[in-house]
Amino acid sequence: MSVVGFDIGNENCVISVVKQGGIDVLLNDECKRETPAVVCFGEKQRFLGSAGAASATMNPKSTISQVKRLIGRNFTDPDVQDDLKKLPFGTSEGQDGGILIDLKYLGESHTFTPVQIMGMLFSHLKEIAEKNLEIPVSDCVIGIPSYFSDLQRRAYLNAAAIAGLKPLRLMHDSTATALSYGIYKTDFPNAGPVYVAFVDIGHCDMQVSIVSFEAGQMRILSHAFDSRLGGRDFDEVLFGYFAAQFKEQYKIDVYSNIRACVRLRTACEKLKKVLSANAQAPLNIECLMDEKDVKGFIKREEFERLASDLFERISIPCKKALADAAIPIGKISSVELVGSGSRIPAIGKMLASMFRKEPSRTLNASECVARGCALQCAMLSPVFRVREYEVQDSFPFSIGFSSDEGPIGTGSNGILFPKGQPIPSIKVLTFQRSNLFHLEAFYANPNELAPGVSSKISSFKIGPLPSSYNDKARVKVRVQLNLHGIVTADSAMLVEDYMDNSVRRATGQMDGDEMEVDSTSFGSSTRPANTDEDEANDRRSDKARRRLEIPVCETIYGGITKAELSEAKDKELQLAQQDKIVEQAKDRKNALESYVYDMRNKLFNTYRSFANDQEREEISRSLQETEEWLYEDGDDETENAYTSKMQDLKKLVDPIENRHKDEEARAHAKRDLMNSIVHYQMAAKSLPTEDRESILNECHKAEQWVKERSQEQDSLPKNTNPVLWSREIRSRAEDLNSRCKHILERKDSEQQD
């Protein structure tokens, strides 16, 4: 069983796996620990990960990146529109208001959703994991930002399903980081909890969590975030600075050229890293646009001045996380700083000033989320043994429910799962209904959400109820906030008591409150919550009760249907098959090209004495014709075309190659045969006369045969087919062994008798 954790970053992805010796980060085909989150559509195939990133500059309009920012988002969202302006590929609005990615592929116009692109990326990461582990990969845990909406979480699950993955949990990035930090620490005091602040500044967002640690357990006290503040925003500061400088100095407008924008943003990202370790840094790009080379220079102080408003924004989520956790700054024992965008020195200074202690970098900033996800996967795995460690996460939003007759839960806004609710959590709602009814799930406080996220989540149709129920019946609906942070009404049950109507009225079951919250239950992240206890108690206390399951139909606002998901899976299989066909053709082409160069060299060196003039001339001509074909008409051919060319060449070369190979093999076979002859001649000395003569006779015949045939072979030139092949000598040696062993075994049998 696979125990894999995936961290899908906006820019790079990391794959981690739990093994018997600990946790490993898997390497991709380029032997790198991080894989670019890029999908590039070439002329005949897709290029994923590192290959896609390498093709980005040449094919910017067909290269899809930063899809994490687009998945589950609305096309008209102002933040989305701002992101799309910086991305080189074409987009449009879908019928459901979502984002569609438009591009040309295989000579046709194609439209993909961000979920499909994410599915392609998951498929690539799955392939890397399977190649490393040499086993199929299915079960996994995937890291997600804590600010992801219900729709975005479902989109991740759908993307994973397209790739053939089965996520055991979608885990908040900060929770995964805290797990990878806390499970290995054994120095927590017994006096009380230790509070640690985790500040994760990634490529596109910032997340902060306050976590309580005790021996054998951890509890997330609060999540806070800024979904629009990350490392790329600091890159954009440099981009804008140099774009303005180049417009003034070189009279070029990089905003008007997609490829120039891509190259300058890449250069600014590298420059930012240089400034993290140096007080100043140069920028040089050859032929940026209009055939002009550009040069620039910036000091760290100037960069920090330009980005001062971004540094100020970093403190806001930190303060919010502390307020939500109700923990004073003085009780924070450590501040752990992680994330790809956290290496800017000014960020560390700002956090040190705010928390009144220097931030620590105990964890690997880029790998801690993937490692935590892999650990959680091991905890959830039924076949992997991990020491007991309780992980209690919390949900960062308030979720409300309403029915046809008004809000459900506490307060006028109908909050059923308040902000900070542990996950997973389950509540059982009781209604008095005589026919089908509807429930609505929604975010009760829009101010808690990331900008642009709709407050609507999903609706549930409960029923229809059996037609025999004219009076109002008691209906119990089980509502769950599951491990993924997704809210569902997963079952409904009609509960019938065997009592007459007068008794029911007397007990208030017909005319009393028509809805009540029966029970609330939640558990740790490693053990699903058990909510059947209350119902079991009901059964024990009242035997005269019947339960009847009622259908529940769910509608997800903005979600995809099962048919659309199935279609996306089929599409991914088709695209993967096309990639495989092209790759196989490339492999055959490379093999043919290598064969041409290899044979040309061997023909006039290694094989020179084994081919006559006519053969050399014919093979040389065929090799030359094949080489010319490869670089002209055969530059882009099918696998069968390359295979056919290879077979034609082999028909000419194989006889010469066989003569060369058999010369050495013939010498080995002759040596083995002569060793066998000497062995049996020595063994025959201790045998009775008749047996000894039989063996010596067999040895003599074999020796004479090989001597005569060898003389005949030695009289022939090497460039003709042998009259004595190595296989004939091996066959003669096997025959000698069989005859002599038979005589020796017969002698041993007679001695035993």
Image (cartoon, grey):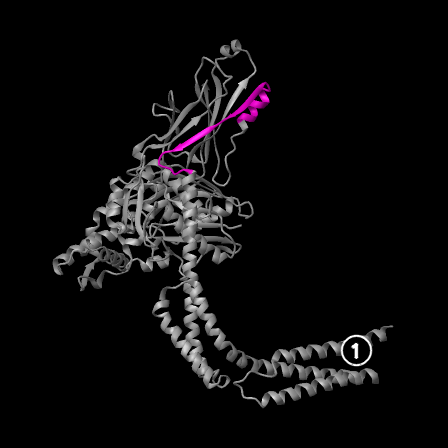
Q: Is residue 586 left or right of residue 610?
A: left
Q: Position of residue 117 (x, y in %)?
A: 36, 48
Q: Residue at x 39, y 38 (%)?
A: 560
Look at the image and tell me in which quarter the C terminus lies: bottom right
Question: Total marks drawn?
Answer: 1
The magenta stretch spans residue 554: yes
Foreground residue among 213 and 257? 257
The type of residue carrying mark 1 is Ile
Q: Residue at x 43, y 82 (%)?
A: 617
Q: Residue farthest to the right?
A: 753
Q: Residue farthest to the top?
A: 502
Q: Is residue 687 left or right of residue 541?
A: right
Q: Is residue 552 above or below residue 615?
A: above
Foreground residue among 201 and 634? 634
Q: Residue at x 26, y 50 (%)?
A: 87
Q: Is residue 484 above or below residue 536?
A: below
Q: Residues within 10 Å of mark 1 (few under 14, many from 20)?
A: some
Q: Identify residue for label 1.
A: 743
Magenta segment: 534-561
Foreground residue among 28 and 630? 630
Q: Position of residue 131 (x, y in %)?
A: 48, 58
Q: Is residue 168 above or below residue 557?
A: below
Q: Position of residue 368 (x, y in %)?
A: 41, 51
Q: Is residue 743 left or right of residue 651?
A: right
Q: Quadrant of residue 100?
A: top left
Q: Position of residue 584 (x, y in %)?
A: 44, 62
The magenta stretch spans residue 169: no
User: Is residue 362 at least partly visible in the picture?
Assistant: no
User: Is residue 132 at least partly visible in the picture?
Assistant: yes
Foreground residue among 258 and 402? 258
| Helix, strand or loop for disc 1 | helix
